[in-house]
Amino acid sequence: MIPPAAPARTIDAPSFSTSRFRAEREADWIAFDLLLTKLEKKGAAALTSDELLQLPLLYRATLSSLSIARATSLDKALLDHLEALSIRGYFLVYGVRESRWNRLRRFFLYDWPAAIRAVWKETVIISLIILLGALTSYSLVSSNPEWYFNFVDEEMSGGRDPRATAEYLQSTLGHGKAVAGESESGLHVFATYLFTHNSRVSILSFALGFAFGVPTMMLEYYQGIGLGAMMAVFAGKGLGYDFGGWLFIHGTTELFAAALSGAAGLRIGTAVVFPGARGRLQAASEAGRTAGKVMVGVIIMLFAAGLLEGFGRQLITDTLLRYAIGSLMLLFWLGYYYIPRREDVT
Amino acid sequence: MTAAAANAKSRAARAKKIRQFITPEGVDLELKIASSGLRFGALLIDLILIALALFLFSLAMLWVGFASQSDVTVVVWMLGAFVLRTFWFVGFELGSRAATPGKRIMGIRVVARDGGRLTADAVVARNLIRELELFLPLMMLGVGASEDMVSGWTMAAGILWSLTLSLFLLFNRDRMRMGDLIAGTWVVMAQRVKLDADIATSSAGEAMAFSESELAVYGIFELQELERVLRGNDPRAMREVADAIRAKIGRPVAEEDDVFLLSYYRQLKARLERKLLFGKRREDKYASD
């Protein structure tokens, strides 16, 4: 590869070698820069097949230039440029491996249910905690209704407390069209409000998980307590069956989502406390990725629950039908998550 | 502290920020961890942009709402605000540049700590935790202010506790947020650097010749500082530097500053690069030649 008749000057003046190196390679760097800009702006689909073939070649040429420059050149501007270009190129060349559509498809078909299956233990624990909270407050309130005011905020309950009459309670369940002063046109506003509110709460219960999962468990326990207290009030007035239907239609989806968000938080908490054979950081990041997938699913579930709560519950007043829809939703989620399927290998 | 020690210290501080990051081709990209100041600046820009977008969106919805007299706009507004708040960061960081507008302006980006590709679940995890880091201190403040029975000290303790979570990145050397820790990510420098002209090839560099002993006084650090001054092209800085070098090597003021500096730069660079090829890297003037 030695040029046969190199000018004598370049041999006794090595100062020219770095300048010549630059002059020879510069065209590649500029071409790579342009290609990357195009890729960033318009995506891989905009590149011609010729450009696609050029991409890895130019990338490798740039990396090799970087190595050579580091070993031979002291030109700071050149080194900085090559470094920045290589970093940019690396993340573009190795970063994009599948299209958005494929990503989405894989998420719904495989990743989402797989992540939910992976946190099944935590889901069971959180469900038990919610149940425990509900049982605690239920037994306390049914033995002494005064307890109710310790559990449920006066403003939140909207008059649904032990002092209310059975007729009033009945009306809040949406029988007889007198739905707490709301007209039907307000339903979608209500549904949206519920969705955004619940999403925020579940994001919080997930995010609190890293504090060893303790705040998450407390939050879920508290959710259970509110539920149990309310149930005790209605059951005490002989409305337990109707209240069940009122709750069931969206509650199966919403409570399932709440349990899953808690489970995601708990997953991170346990990974931090008991990392096992892995490093603590690695355990946390692995748990975090699973939990991230679960949380995207939780937000989608809460959206469905908001629709059911805002529209379904207010428009469907037949208790049996409410039970049927609630059970159907529960079966759907259980089937979607836990029925084993062949994993996508690609 | 002597100048030599200070120099070595600043170099060590810079080296501390560099993380080994080896590509499959075997080249170390030497990623630099973004400083907390840059991170905070990026966050501030993003928050301002979100607020601005929210304001414009609200105005538009208000206008549409008054025009149509329908409460569907309320739904659109609530959903839009929620999506904007929750998915602003996720949406941008999932893009090919893995950076929100604030991060782009600051020249930083998110990368996976293990060197693999940045996955969507990692981005989601790191940004949902942000919800907590940003709003927990505010919430504590709100709760403390609204409930009189909470004493000032309890409130202070609550805020302090939540601040330790929010300021977690100040307490570790990788500048990881809580969310970075859990998602397995880093935020690193990703500035774009323009390819500047090669000043060593310009014609003015041959005007003077320096002897070996005149060139032996400086190392790589001084060379690159000189390069910075030459590229900056500020006459006053050049005069100062030229005078300093002339005093050091004992030369009278005889030529134009830029001619003198360019020749000196070119010959010093040639000398140090020649030494580099023989495996001798002289970091600064304090190192032995």
Image (tube, coloured by chain):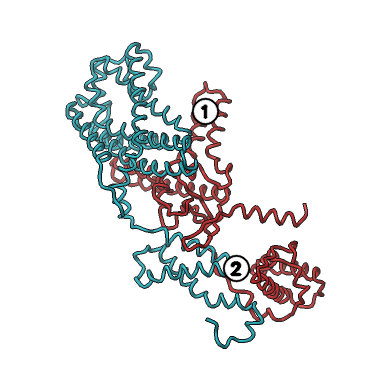
Of all residues, the one furthest to the front in this rendering is: A277
Kind of residue at disc 1 = Ala
Picture coordinates of residue A51 (x, y %)? 38, 71
Q: In the image, is A51 to the left or to the right of A326?
A: right
Q: Which chain is red?
A: B
Q: Locate the C terminus of chain A and report the quarter of the image it occupies.
A: bottom left
Chain at tag 1: B
Q: Of residues A272 and A293, which is closer to you in this image?
A: A272
Q: Which chain is cyan?
A: A
Label 2: which secondary element: helix
Q: In the image, is B122 to the left or to the right of B173?
A: left
Above or below, B96 relative to B264: above
Picture coordinates of residue A227 (x, y %)? 33, 24
Q: Are the residues under badges 2 and 1 in a single subunit?
A: no
Query: Mark 2 sits on what residue?
Result: A71
Query: Dividing the picture into quarters, in which one does residue A338 lie?
Result: top left
Above or below, A196 relative to A69: above
So how many labels did they put on this image? 2
Query: Mark 1 sits on what residue?
Result: B145
Picture coordinates of residue A301 (x, y %)? 30, 39
Of all residues, the one furthest to the top in this rendering is: A144
Residue at x 67%, y 74% (from the top left corner)? B270
Above or below, B52 relative to A137: below
Label 1: which secondary element: helix
Above or below, B138 relative to B254: above
